[in-house]
Image (spheres, rainbow, N blue to C red):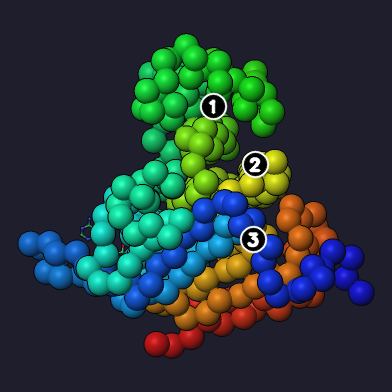
Amino acid sequence: MATTQLRAAATEPQPAEDIAGVELRGVTRRFRSSRSGEVVALRGLDLCAAGGEVLAVVGPSGCGKSTLLELLAGLGDPDEGSVAARGITSREGRLAACAYMPQRDLLLPWRNALANAALALEVQGVAAGSARRRALPLFERFGLGEFAGALPAELSGGMRQRVAFLRTLLAGRPVLLLDEPFGALDSITRATMQEWLAEALATEPRTVVLVTHDVREALYLGDRVAVLSPRPGRLVAELCVPFERPRPRRETVTDPAFAALEERALEALEAPR
Ligand SMILES: Nc1ncnc2c1ncn2[C@@H]1O[C@H](COP(=O)(O)OP(=O)(O)OP(=O)(O)O)[C@@H](O)[C@H]1O
Ligand SMILES: [Mg+2]
């Protein structure tokens, strides 16, 4: 018998009704460029994340993962279908509900770590000093206290990603949209960061849409994993992950149920279209 704690219900994520969820229904998104003509990034995509759920999204490069986060974040509208956060489909509604951590960390090189994170509050009109005072406890709580004064160039890749994540958290939104948050890291740092993120989400529950190209990362962090087809991206498989979060890494990744899910996800990714 595997030692990892299985949920009683085994298939159902445990949503927190008071946290906003997100939903895409029949979403098609096209781009037009003078060079390559029309590109259909997403076609007829249905996807949702319930309040407090971590939905991991995997799919081949170029299948529209960043595009779907941009739509959720309110940075664009679909050509067909609807995108909603907390049931509100307007761009303003999505902008208000979601904090977006883009694929690159985008820290300002001239601001120290604390000032970079505090930016999330400053853009909401909080004065700089007060924003930094509010950001500091989060740095201490998540193990970055002694690096608050460091410039991005003085931080390791993992630390920069943590600062970028804290900035996303500080925005105070119920929904976090994370695009390949650990994509640029080596595998050891990546594993440490995954555990750190799992702990952070246990302390600060949010609805999360996590884009990654790493199936193991998706299964380790997600309540549910959505597998997208090559472009145009649409849903080809959806897997429920039956382990409580946060999860002990070794026990989880060596559990036969985890290996079976990994196999199913890889099959769905590799299936001919
Ligand atoms: N602003 C844009 N203008 C034109 N084409 C775009 C634009 N944004 C995305 N695309 C195209 O849409 C498709 C999906 O892009 P997207 O960045 O969403 O993919 P992705 O799944 O995030 O890829 P990756 O895994 O490499 O990050 C690609 O073919 C891309 O070239
Ligand atoms: Mg992308």
Q: Residues within 10 Å of mark 2 (few under 14, many from 20)?
A: few
- The extreme bottom residue here reads 272
Q: Dots 2 and 3: beta carbons under 8 Å? A: no
Type of the residue with mark 1: Leu
Sequence-wise first label, 3 or 1: 3
Task: State whether residue 180 appears in this view.
Answer: no
Sequence-wise first label, 1 or 2: 1
Q: Residue at x 48, y 27 (%)?
A: 117
Type of the residue with mark 3: Pro
Secondary structure beneath label 1: loop
Residue toward you, 267 or 8: 8
Q: Residue at x 12, y 62 (%)?
A: 33
The answer for how far apart the CA atoms under marks 3 and 1 are is: 35 Å
Type of the residue with mark 2: Glu
Q: Position of residue 132 (x, y in %)?
A: 51, 17
Report the mark closest to the observer, 3 or 1. Answer: 3
For the C terminus, the quadrant is bottom left
Q: Quick check: 178 above or below 15?
A: above
Q: Quick check: 170 above or below 91?
A: above
The answer for how far apart the CA atoms under marks 2 and 3 are is: 14 Å
Q: Quick check: 72 above or below 162?
A: below
Whether ligand 2 has any atom under 8 Å from the Cβ at mark 2 is answered as no
Q: Which mark is residue 270?
A: none
Secondary structure beneath label 3: loop
For the N terminus, the quadrant is bottom right
Per the image, the residue denoted by label 2 is 204
Per the image, the residue denoted by label 1 is 155
Per the image, the residue denoted by label 3 is 15
Task: State whether residue 81 appears in this view.
Answer: yes
